[in-house]
Amino acid sequence: MTRYITRRLIQMVPLLLGISFLVFAMINLVPGSPLDRYQNTPGVRRADLERISASLGLDDPWYIRYFTWLGNAVRGDFGFSFTNFSPVSGLLADTVPNTLLLAGSAILFSLILAIPLGVISAVKRGSLFDNVVTVLSTAFYSIPSLWLGLMFIIIFAVQFQRWDLPSLPVSGDRTLRGESGILDRAQHLILPMLTLSLVQLALWTRYIRSEMLEVIRLDFVRTAQSKGLRDRVVLMRHAFRNAVLPLITLVGLNIPDLFAGAVIVENVFGWNGVGRLTVNALQSNNYSVAMAAVMMLAILTVLGNLIADILYAVFDPRVRFD
């Protein structure tokens, strides 16, 4: 296992280098400059902007700037923001934990609900419960995260206030006025987490149902039942353990979609994460922040897939990487 993990980590290096090159090229080939916002600022002359541009290396060709950025990034220096002149590393330190909290809670919530819903739907195939779960999972899988987030805001914030019901906060990750504790943090997390997780919940519920229907028809399940084992033992120890293995792979494959959805959800709810940081940086041509934020999302995605592969070996003793 150690050799496999080491080999995968080494393989990540050329992959991330290729991603960084393509992302840097796309960001820097877009028309505009980080200094464009200062062109109409009173007291700022064109000569001043040209001098600043030259000192920052913005006049160099983009591929020269890429290797300069890469050399600094290897040393942990991602530059500074062109909007507030704060270090990019500090911005990442403030936003990465929030994105991990949002994505991690969405995965955990989806799995906690998807596993029992999928198993029960497969066991009670054709029942009212199965039909309701199938209809709801199909509906939620088809709803865009943007629209779903807006509906949650309208219902749980606007309408709940009109109905004199406890409403949920819809912006930010904590209350700015007063003390912000764990409960306040959890309240701000509920709506963005639900918005991000419901699509995955619908997909994983349908997948578990399908896998369970396949497994419970296999011979080894019938053999276990014929030996007189209890239905719960046959279902969970034999059928579910084989059905859950492809789910681990599916979760790993859905990690990129999860982070892509986080970009939308964080902007809808004003959640201070890497996705919101990326969008704000791209809108202001803030090259250094946008580059670092996109690369951080790429690193999290690659590491997430590696963790999924490791978990696959943990749950299936037949899998050996060494």
Image: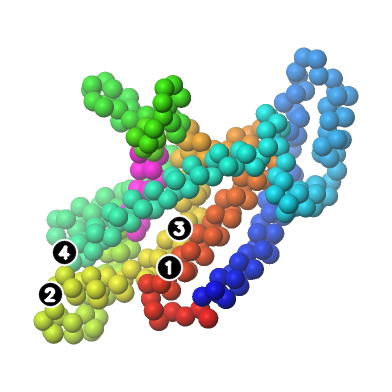
User: Which numbered disc, 1 or 4, marks the residue closer to the eye?
Assistant: 1
Q: Secondary structure at mark 1?
A: helix
Q: Which residue is mark 2?
A: 230
Mark sitting on residue 124: 4
Q: Which residues are magenta?
A: 190-204
The residue positioned 40% from the left and 66% from the top of the image is: 248
* Residue 192 falls left or right of residue 162: right
Q: Which residue is mark 3?
A: 254
Magenta span: predominant SS is helix
**Earlier residue among tags 1 and 4:** 4
Mark sitting on residue 311: 1
Q: Position of residue 235 (x, y in %)?
A: 20, 71
Magenta residue check for 31: no
Type of residue at label 2? Answer: Arg
Label 3 to label 4: alpha-carbon separation: 27 Å
Q: Please report the residue visible at 51 percent of the width from the left and 55 percent of the height from the top.
A: 256
Q: Are marks 3 and 4 in contact (CB under 8 Å)?
A: no
Badge 4, how many Cα within 10 Å: few under 14, some, many 20+? few
Determine whether label 2 and label 4 are within 8 Å by CB.
Answer: no
Mark in front: 2 vs 4: 2
User: In the visual, does 17 lie left or right of 166?
Assistant: right
The kind of secondary structure element at disc 4 is loop
Measured Cα–Cα span from mark 1 to mark 2: 28 Å
Secondary structure under tag 2 reads loop
* Image coords of residue 199 (percent x, y): 37, 50
Q: Is residue 124 above or below residue 161?
A: below
